[in-house]
Amino acid sequence: MSDLMAEITKAMGFRHYALVHHVDLKPAVRSVHIVDYPQDWVERFQARRLYASDPIHRASHRTNVGFAWSAVQSIISLTAADRSILAEAYEAGLGDGFTVPAHIPGELNGSCSFAMAAGEMLDHRQLPFVQLVGSFAFEAARKISRIHAPQSECPSLTERQAECVALVARGKTDWEISQILGIGQETVIQHVKDARDRYGVTKRTLLAIRALFEGQISFADVFGR
Amino acid sequence: MHIGTGFSQAMEHRLFRSMFEERKRVFVDLLRWDVPVIAGRYEIDQFDNDRAVYIVVTGDDGEHRASARLLPTTHEHILGTIFPDLCEEAPPRGSAILEITRFCLARKLRARERLELRNQLVTALVEYALANQIHSFTGVAEWPWFQQILGFGWTCRPLGLPTSEQGRSLVALQIDVDDRTREQLRASGIFRPVGLADLPAAA
């Protein structure tokens, strides 16, 4: 896969690429991470855990289509910290680039990026093609990671558990949930506990966030329609 | 799964009428598509004619949950008529090629049910193709939906470059269906048994 990525990156006239899921919840399971960025930058990026605050990653969560890094301000507003991250990346040799978001319900957010070296011009007309290549690259990586991680490792909730978790996300107490669903409070407590166990989390807040993240419940379930 | 052949026949059945109602709720009320609404409740356009085929997946209560419309590519269809520019070459046409349009999941479904129904409908479309000597589906998708379609694991390729304006992006695609498709869907966790036994009865 890395070889293929290197080849297509070169063929399209780029210097660097990164094909990544954005959060490592459980390293080695279902998550994709294939990167060829300047070594110096990769080290700084990891040391400072920038994957959560990287403005490019954040912007990619706000859109579904590919964008040029130089246009990131049209998607999110940049803080001083964001600007310094971008400046540092540039200093480390990473120029302008494209990022293609990879968002699929029930899956971690990810992206595929292609970048020029610092100081080189980006050809914006390439974007539609890069968007296609990025999406297919991500799908290929997804297929490979599927081979290594059987489906059963993906925790899923039962109907009732998901209903309870959606109500937890709405800030309801176990008693309130029991009233809404017309079931016993003890039963609700058990459902919520089982759901927490499935994700291996101990807090209700984290449970709701994980279930949202995994697509077991949606924002529509939480905010209603 | 239930199969309706032709618009007039479909309109005679309550199940398919509720499909046209759901299409209004999804495509007009929710997605704000500029498509006609008939009698204030049905979303029906010029492609809902007697050559259209409707696939409906129902819930345990027998009500509409998910549906899609299949159009013959040998006659007027969306890619050939409205979006031929999305194809780098001429839009694919042929008696073994159908266009999937109005892929519709009921609005009231919750996230998990949506994914489940989506998977059932995708499988139903594949089963329909395999039972009717259809080798390919074509379609037009917005970019986020195209990413999902690609993620189903079947053989899917773009027919041209995606367009991009104001953060929205459209792409034309072709999906090939053959004896490997079920296995491909199984590998990505999409495949669901959809009760082909219903087929002759419902047709």
Image (cartoon, coloured by chain):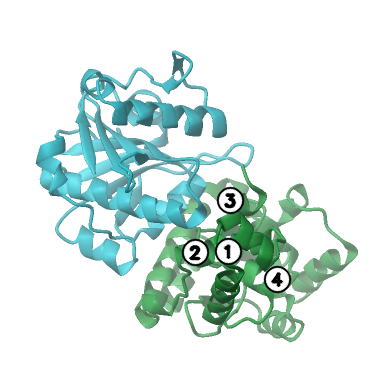
Chain colours: A green, B cyan
Tell me the crowding category of disc 3: few under 14, some 14 to 19, or many 20 or more residues within 10 angstroms, Cα based: many
The quarter of the picture where the C terminus of chain B appears is: top left
- Image coords of residue B28 (percent x, y): 52, 27
Residue A160: numbered disc? 2
Mark 4 vs mark 3, foreground winner is: 4
Q: Residue at x 62, y 76 (%)?
A: A37
> Residue B116's quadrant in the figure?
bottom left
- For the residues bearing labels 1 and 3, Cβ distance under 8 angstroms: no
Q: Secondary structure at mark 1?
A: helix
Q: Closer to the N terminus: mark 1 or mark 3? A: 3
Residue A186: numbered disc? none
Q: Amino acid at mark 2?
A: Arg
Q: Closer to the N terminus: mark 4 or mark 2? A: 2
Letter of the chain that mark 2 sits on in the rendering: A
- For the residues bearing labels 2 and 1, Cβ distance under 8 angstroms: yes
Tell me the crowding category of disc 2: few under 14, some 14 to 19, or many 20 or more residues within 10 angstroms, Cα based: some
Mark 1 vs mark 3, foreground winner is: 1
Q: Closer to the N terminus: mark 3 or mark 2? A: 3
User: Is there one chain holding both mark 2 and mark 1?
Assistant: yes
Q: Amino acid at mark 3?
A: Asn
Vertical comparison of B198 with A147: above or below: above
Q: Amino acid at mark 4?
A: Thr
User: Is there one chain holding both mark 4 and mark 2?
Assistant: yes
Alpha carbon of mark 4 to alpha carbon of mark 3: how far? 27 Å
Alpha carbon of mark 2 to alpha carbon of mark 1: how far? 6 Å
The quarter of the picture where the N terminus of chain B appears is: top left
- Provide the residue designation for mark 4: A205
Q: Secondary structure at mark 2?
A: helix
- Provide the residue designation for mark 1: A164
Letter of the chain that mark 1 sits on in the rendering: A
Alpha carbon of mark 4 to alpha carbon of mark 2: how far? 18 Å
Q: Residue at x 28, y 48 (%)?
A: B175
